[in-house]
Image: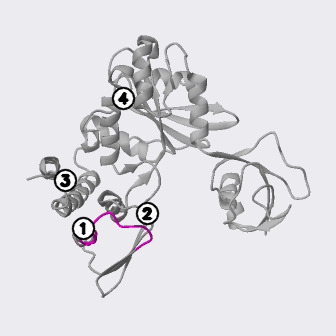
Amino acid sequence: MGILEKIKEIEEEIRKTQYNKATEKHIGILKAKLAKLRRALLSSKKGGGHGFSISKSGDATVALIGFPSVGKSTLLAKLTNAETKAAGYAFTTLSVVPGMLLYKKARIQILDLPGIIEGAAYGKGRGKEVISVARNADLLLILLEPFNAEKHFKAIMKELKAMAIRHGKRPEIYVERKHKGGIALFYSKHLSVDEELVKSILNEYGIHNANVIIREEVTPEKLIDVLENNRVYIPYIVAINKIDMCDEELLNKLRLKFKDVVFISAEKGIGIEELKEAIFNSLNFIRVYTKPLGGEPDLDEPMMLRRGATIREVCLKLHRDLLKNFKYALVWGKSAKFPGQRVGLDHKLEDEDIVTIVSR
């Protein structure tokens, strides 16, 4: 039996098994086995073909994901003026088409990916290559059309999950292996799952001696994600296209089903500015101004960085040699304890900080 057949068999067993306290441990072990099989399948070359070679550029990269014929190519053209083939039939885009969105002095790379279909994570329609590009993005823009929005959204989220892409942040679960002493659990909140279930999942990964520190509500899926150690955590926004083709009643239903959705018509240019603003805000940019030693800061051209960026990122963005020859930096602004504070490479910056890099 091949890996894909084993995956389908376990998925079917999980689906058929009624979840209760008596079956909780069994289902948890099945989910761990399923995660390991998916990892083995995704790491295999079989059926993968040639990958898409895309270099990241700009201040951030956004991957445009959706089913075929939802209007991704038309939207890319509206956002970036990129020349991309668009037509009213499926599979227009057969490769990754990049474009650059210029908005509020940020350069945002938008990647129009080929349409994905159900089973994409396991290789259908070159899906593995498509979602592999998405794994390297800073933001996912999920594009839906109104008439199948809920169905397609669930299918896309299923494919992203199968390719180890998660929304939100990494679970605060830490596993410290040790040579003996068994498994000891330390948790700051009430543990809602059975301790034996946690230990069984750890055992499934060959972990029999460890300190497990749990700082949030734990589920079998969260624990498995931590143990797999191949998950990427990427935010996403949802846009529903072709709103010019549906009535207000359908739009109201969609507003109830989707939180913070942006309604657009790429063809008619409706909602494009609102979508640009949503993309910009979701990327959590901060503006950092550089200042030469003894000179004045350049307030016309801010450096666009992501929230949480450090002096190290400033050096890398300016020139790699700055990192090699770095001596210290001077900072003015919200992140500084006082104007002109001397800081090191790991100093975290805030929006509108002014920075001077001093080299050896």
Q: For this view, does 211 lie left or right of residue 200?
A: right
Give the answer, above or below, for where 137 lies relative to 188.
above
Label 2 SS: loop
Q: Quadrant of the C terminus?
A: bottom right
Rounded to the nearest angstrom, the CA distance separating label 3 from label 4 is 42 Å
Give the answer, above or below, for where 77 lies relative to 334.
above
Label 1 SS: helix
Q: Amino acid at mark 1?
A: Leu
Q: Which-is-in-front pick, marks 3 and 4? A: 3
Tag shown at residue 19: 3
Rounded to the nearest angstrom, the CA distance separating label 3 from label 1 is 13 Å
Q: Which residue is mark 1?
A: 197
Q: Amino acid at mark 4?
A: Leu
Q: Residues at badges 3 and 4 in contact (C-beta under 8 Å)?
A: no
Label 3 SS: loop
Q: For this view, does 79 lie left or right of residue 51?
A: right
- Is residue 50 in sight in this rendering? no
Q: Which residue is mark 4?
A: 94
Q: Position of residue 152 (x, y in %)?
A: 32, 30
Q: Residues at badges 1 and 2 in contact (C-beta under 8 Å)?
A: no
Q: Which residue is mark 2?
A: 216
What segment is highlighted magenta in the picture?
A: 187-199
